[in-house]
Amino acid sequence: MNVSRWRMTRRRWLGSAAALALAPSALTRAAANDAFPSRPIMLWVPWAAGGATDISMRVLADLASRQLGQRVIVENRGGAGGTLAMPVLQQAEPDGYTIAQLPQPIFRAYFTQSVHWHPLNDVTPIIQISGVTFGLLVGAASVFESLDDLFAYARAQPGALSIATNGVGTSPHLVLEELFTARGLRYIHVPYKGVSEQINAIMSGQVMAGVSSTGFGPAVDAGRLRLLTTFAAQRSKRWPRVPTLRELGYDIVAQSPYGLGGPRGLPGKVVTVLHDAFRKAMFDPQFVEEIAKYDQELDYLGPAAYAQACRETFARERAAVERTRAK
């Protein structure tokens, strides 16, 4: 073998040896890149910042971050009755780094609005967390003492009664339609992007009344708002003197469970990691105490059970909309 050929062979051998020496570290880096999560996760909340849901979701995100070893960053996208996180999920990569809170209105909006997403087909359910009930509120200085007072004013002053909700097509809006419009009573519907803006409007007198989720709890307890009725099946332990709509003679119960979901096609292993972290976070005493401020309790469902609950909710909303249109 001549000298030049020997040198070429030696260089090839050294190169192969070097590659073999580096192979374990390269494999280690690849494995690390495959580990989930390896970077921050974005949690989209479809309500304005500062409301009860936003605040509690931030507490939950912080607790889940400790379990995941990566930050869970909350981003707000309020408006359109709590549906604006759906386009984000629809367009996101199914890698677990984009998730969103799933509120009740997304299942109804599919039938009442022109949307380009599907609340079942474009979502991978991860975990159900809790649920909110609703109440009819007025300012502490309001002359209205009951639901009948509001009805009487609407009859005497058609179209003058202003009532705020958290958006068009939401549960509060539909309940108002059933209570007022179905009885031939007119009112001014004032939708808000978030609970905090809505509550401030009621307290300041910008609107005469409002239907809101139980984020109103602290303001009611502080005497800044008056709660006229709740929409739950039973009276609240927190406000035992406040009647439900059923007790007032209206067969209406409106509750709104919520959870977290990711884009369609989220891998099962990623779902498991997210579910386990958020399950530990939601049962943390800090989160339980936080949602108790808003008269909420934990209502846990795992991925499979939550997916089934979403399908059942979707079917109920479709039936409800069809009944409404048939009238």
Image (cartoon, grey):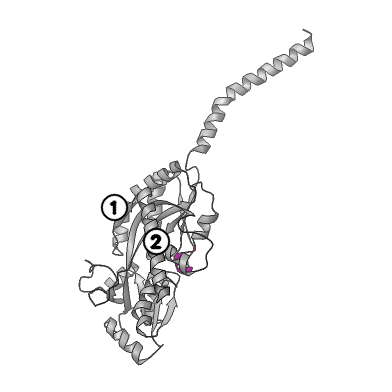
At x 27%, y 82%, the residue is 146
Magenta highlight range: 77-84
Q: From the viewer's side, name the closer residue of 51 and 189.
A: 189
Indicate whether 72 appears above or below 314: above
Query: Could you tell me how many numbered marks the image carries?
Result: 2
Q: Quadrant of residue 260?
A: bottom left
| Label 2 sits on residue | 315
Residue 15 is tagged as none
Other-residue count near label 1 (Cα within 10 Å), few / some / many at <14 / 14–19 / ≥20: few
Tell me which amino acid carries mark 2. Answer: Ala
Quarter occupied by the C terminus: bottom left
- Residue 47 horizontal/vertical position (percent): 44, 65
Percent of width and height locating residue 32: 51, 35
Q: Earlier in the sequence, mark 1 or mark 2?
A: 1
Examine the residues drawn in magenta and state their main secondary structure. loop
Is residue 29 depicted above or below 194 in this figure? above
Secondary element at image label 2: helix
Tell whether 184 sits left or right of 71.
left
Q: Which dot marks residue 285?
A: 1
User: Does residue 219 appear left or right of residue 77 in this picture?
Assistant: left
- Let me know if residue 170 appears in the view: no
Q: Residue at x 54, y 52 (%)?
A: 92
Residue 221, visible in the rendered structure:
yes
Judge by depth and name the residue closer to the eye, 305 or 40: 305
Q: Nearer the viewer, mark 1 or mark 2?
A: 2
* The one of 248 and 199 positioned closer to us in this rendering: 248
